[in-house]
Image (spheres, helix red, strand yellow):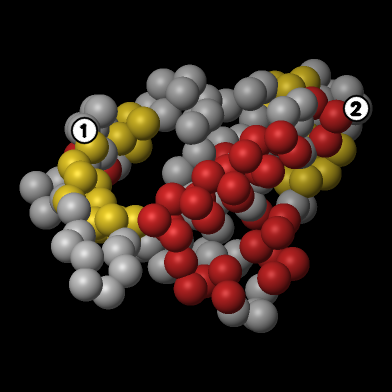
Amino acid sequence: MYPTIVAILPRVAKKDTIVAGLHIPKGTVVGTQNYTIHRSERAFHDPDNFLPERWLDDKNVDARKEAFVPFSVGPRRCIGMNLAQMELSKLIAAFFLRFNATIDPSMRPEEMRIFDSFNAGPAGRRLLIRLKEKHSEGEAPGTITIQH
């Protein structure tokens, strides 16, 4: 729920309209951020905390689907969305089949706040994770640390 694109992508209202009960006159520049949408408490309980089990809950499925828009929506959404989703699902599956990953204890919460530019990243400009390679019984595990 930390999108890489946090900048507002502005659009101009082509006609007078009403959005969520608010009148938007023709010509008004409007926009929203995925970061803000992904923090909707209507869709995501406790949105600022890492709760992967939220995706297993059968409640609010429609609200979560509507509020989770990492590739944008509509005719201008990311053209590479399907390829990216396929690649990410394969990569994540292969990664977690091989490793157990935890955030390195040296990481501080303020380093993980979002750094706001067009492309986002952690404010601390780093994310340290500790990887323990999964192993068969009897094998010694190796530990790998990655720093960007």
For label 1, the residue is 147
**Which mark is in front, 2 or 1?**
1
Per the image, label 1 sits on a secondary structure element best described as loop
Query: In the displayed structure, would residue 13 be above or below residue 112?
Result: above
Residue 13 in sight in this render:
yes
Query: In the displayed structure, would residue 79 be above or below residue 39?
Result: above
**Based on the displayed image, in which of its 4 quarters is residue 51 positioned?**
bottom left
Query: In the displayed structure, would residue 103 be above or below residue 111?
Result: below
Count of numbered circles on the image = 2
Q: Amino acid at mark 2?
A: Lys
Q: Is residue 13 left or right of residue 57?
A: right
Taking depth in this image into account, of 41 and 23 the one nearest to the observer is 41
Q: Is residue 123 left or right of residue 143?
A: right
**Based on the displayed image, in which of its 4 quarters is residue 114 positioned?**
top left
Query: In the displayed structure, would residue 76 be above or below residue 61?
Result: above
Mark 1 crowdedness (10 Å alpha carbons): few <14, some 14-19, many ≥20: few
Q: Is residue 95 left or right of residue 73?
A: left
**Based on the displayed image, in which of its 4 quarters is residue 34 positioned?**
top right
Q: Residue furthest right?
A: 15
Of the two numbered discs 2 and 1 on the same chain, state the one appearing first in sequence. 2
Q: Residue at point 31% right, 69% down?
A: 136
For label 2, the residue is 15
Per the image, label 2 sits on a secondary structure element best described as loop
Taking depth in this image into account, of 21 and 93 the one nearest to the observer is 93
Q: Residue furthest front?
A: 138
Taking depth in this image into account, of 122 and 17 the one nearest to the observer is 122
